Amino acid sequence: MPVRTSTHKFKLGQSVQLLANEARLKPLGTFEVIRILPTEHGHRQYRIRSLLDRHERVVMEVELA
């Protein structure tokens, strides 16, 4: 089933910043959106990759700018 991207704020290939939160006291740098994931429990999600060390992670849209 294809993921609907019209409700997601960020697009595939877009550069984003991973914001600081309670667990991360400072932003972790610039990441690239490599996959738009389905919304789960009302939260839009993305798979992102660090432009610095190529580390990948899954994050919620509210964690990105």
Image (cartoon, helix red, strand yellow):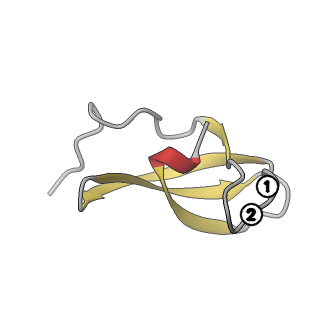
Residue at image point 27% right, 34% down: 7
Q: Nearer the viewer, mark 1 or mark 2?
A: 2
Say if 64 sits above or below 23 in the image: above
> Identity of the amino acid at label 1?
Leu
**Secondary structure of the residue carrying numbered label 2:** loop
Q: Which mark is residue 36?
A: none
Tell me the residue that label 1 is attached to.
Answer: 28
Q: Residues within 10 Å of mark 2 (few under 14, many from 20)?
A: few
Tell me the residue that label 2 is attached to.
Answer: 24
User: In the shown orientation, is residue 53 left or right of residue 7?
Assistant: right
> Residue 24 location, x and y as percent?
74, 63
Quadrant including the N terminus? bottom left
> Residue 42 location, x and y as percent?
25, 53
Q: CA distance from mark 1 to mark 2?
A: 8 Å
> Identity of the amino acid at label 2?
Arg
Q: Mark 1 touching mark 2, by CB under 8 A?
A: yes
User: In the shown orientation, is residue 33 left or right of residue 3?
Assistant: right
Residue at image point 22% right, 41% down: 4
The outermost residue toward the front is 22
> Residue 16 location, x and y as percent?
65, 39
> Residue 43 location, x and y as percent?
33, 54
The outermost residue toward the left is 1
Residue at image point 59% right, 67% down: 57
**Secondary structure of the residue carrying numbered label 1:** loop
